[in-house]
Amino acid sequence: MNSHRIVIVGGGFGGLQAALGLKRADVEITLIDRRNFHLFQPLTYQVATGALSPGEVAYPLRAVFKRDRNVSVLLAEVADFDLERREVILRSVDGLPAPEPVPYDTLIVAGGSHYSYFGHDEWSAHAAEVKSLESALTVRSRILAAALGDMGFHPETHAVLGMLADKDIRGVIDATRSRVDRWHVAPLPGPRGAPASLLVEHLHAAGIPDAAVRRYDSIDSAFRGARSAVGETDRIVTFGSFLTVAAALTAHRPAPVRTKQTSHG
């Protein structure tokens, strides 16, 4: 006899707790989410203010259930429910092929919630939400732009930009473009890294002229390119991802001094 099939939509607090509570039962669980991580939303405001990195508030769902053979995690977005056939219809995310419809005996829908502006959606332009990782990073960019404006005068600001493709690239650019004169863009490593061509495309769409943009093969080379282009009183800002900052810090770190030891005797 086949095990009872439970499909859980959403890997937030509700969906995660449902899967954790049912995993020891004689059931087959499929957890579906359009993100491959569980986000601890109470701390997203600390990501927005720069106190925490995104990796500190997001944990991979597959890692949570890696020892539970009866739990499967699917990266997909729900397109529809076929209640007669008792199937969940899925669509692709992040360019991955869409999985086949998932049959179920019991369906748990825990898709989460969204901000309410009490019928005044125009408030969203002034009261940004930080419910998702993407929105928290957008708010962080706005804070960065405001901080740059409060700093002392610099003739030019050079930005080293690298981002993951699934982040709000245009939102980050829109929040900082008024504070940046020159853009040095490069891809981040790995399949989720946005190629430099995509960053340039968003910069052009935001009205940044091509003369103000230079592309590189790596964050390391972008940071070095920015250092060679700045004047004595110009400044360099690095943002877009903690991976971008880490690579720039590595490039900025001075090489260790090697000494040659000699023996006398």
Image (cartoon, grey):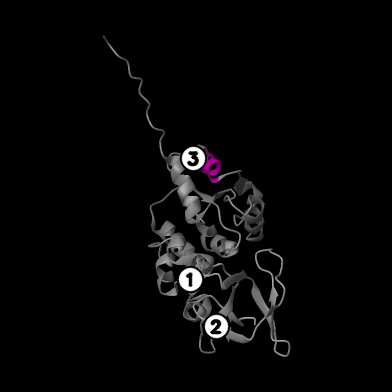
Q: CA distance from mark 3 to mark 1?
A: 36 Å
Q: Which residue is mark 3?
A: 227
**Residue at image x 32%, y 15%?**
262
Percent from the top left, x then y, of residue 88? 68, 81
- Name the residue type under label 1: Leu
Q: Which residue is mark 1?
A: 39
Is residue 259 visible to the viewer in this orientation of the structure? yes
Mark 3 or mark 1, which is nearer to you?
1
> Which residue reaches farthest front?
1
Q: Which residues are magenta?
A: 219-227
Position of 126 with respect to 216 (left or right) is left
- Name the residue type under label 3: Arg
Give the SS element for disc 3. Answer: helix
Position of 110 with respect to 77 (left or right) is left
- Name the residue type under label 2: Ala
- Number of other residues with Cα within 10 Å of mark 1, as a class: few under 14, some 14 to 19, many 20 or more: many
Q: Which of 186/55 is in front?
A: 55
Check if residue 127 falls in the magenta segment: no
